[in-house]
Amino acid sequence: MTIETISENRSHGGVQGVYAHASSATSTKMTFSVFVPEHQPGVRLPVLWYLSGLTCTHANVTEKGEFRAACAQNGIIFIAPDTSPRGEGVPDDSAGAWDFGLGAGFYVDATEKPWSANYKMWSYMTDELPALIAQHFPVDMDRQSITGHSMGGHGALTAALRHPGRYRSVSAFAPICHPVMAPWGKKAFPLYLGQDQAEWRAHDATALIEDGARVAEILVDVGLGDNFLEEQLMPDALEAACAAAGIDLTLRRQPGYDHSYYFISTFMADHVAWHAARLNRE
């Protein structure tokens, strides 16, 4: 598998790159960013995956996430994929809605037409992209962690719950915790996955935990000034499911913070350090 280098910039002693490749999962060109901190030749570094939210591309966190200083300090590679397939011929919401279609792949493999031709973000981010990263970057794939924001927080939580043992830790910023009950999920899931709600539950962190999926611990930050908090994010549902399952959830409710990258960047270093403690553990 080959990649195209779009840009590389020196930052915090390392290299912030943006790359593209032809994806077999989505049948489109996909763009992603990778920050590789300064390291000794031949040394393989742990990986922190970051999944972005609705309307975003790889660029939002790359430009506004303020992760590089913390990743450089802790020796962690930071990878940010796109949120959906893009390009001529890729279907989009006919009304131009921002919460479905382009920029809103929800990290699922669509089974319904016309979305099923390209919207294979689950396979892309859990299978194809990790294999590509392992081929081209100095990563230690035995030391992976995952985080994300909003729709990407949903993706990070479900990836960790459905791949026990792959990720040493999982966290999220303002995740969609219970999408089968949230308006965003109720809109997207039937269009992507059809009417069988058992398929929806496989992409819902709260439902997965209720159905027996487990991780040891989770870190979540939400802003109490987030307009989406109660109706869309539903962290109380995740908190109740984790309590019933015995999962160690640290749910931090941050007064005054909203849903934006001002919120994410404020607590990004905390999350990187939290993951680093687990990624660097023997």
Image: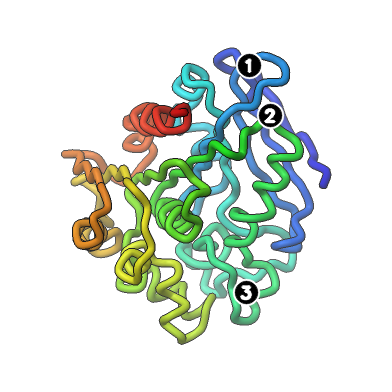
Element under label 1?
A: loop
Q: Is residue 127 left or right of residue 169?
A: right
Furthest-right residue in view? 2
> How far apart, in angstroms, are the residues tagged by discs 3 and 1?
41 Å
Q: Are marks 1 and 2 in contact (CB under 8 Å)?
A: yes
Element under label 2?
A: loop
Element under label 3?
A: helix
Residue 154 appears in view: yes
* Type of amino acid under label 3: Trp
Q: Look at 59% across and 21% down and name the residue there.
A: 37
Residue 132 place in picture, x, y as percent: 72, 45
Residue 282 place in picture, x, y as percent: 47, 28
Q: Look at 59% across and 49% down and name the residue there.
A: 82
> How far apart, in angstroms, are the residues tagged by discs 2 and 3?
34 Å
Residue 29 place in picture, x, y as percent: 75, 53
The foreground one among 254 and 103 is 254
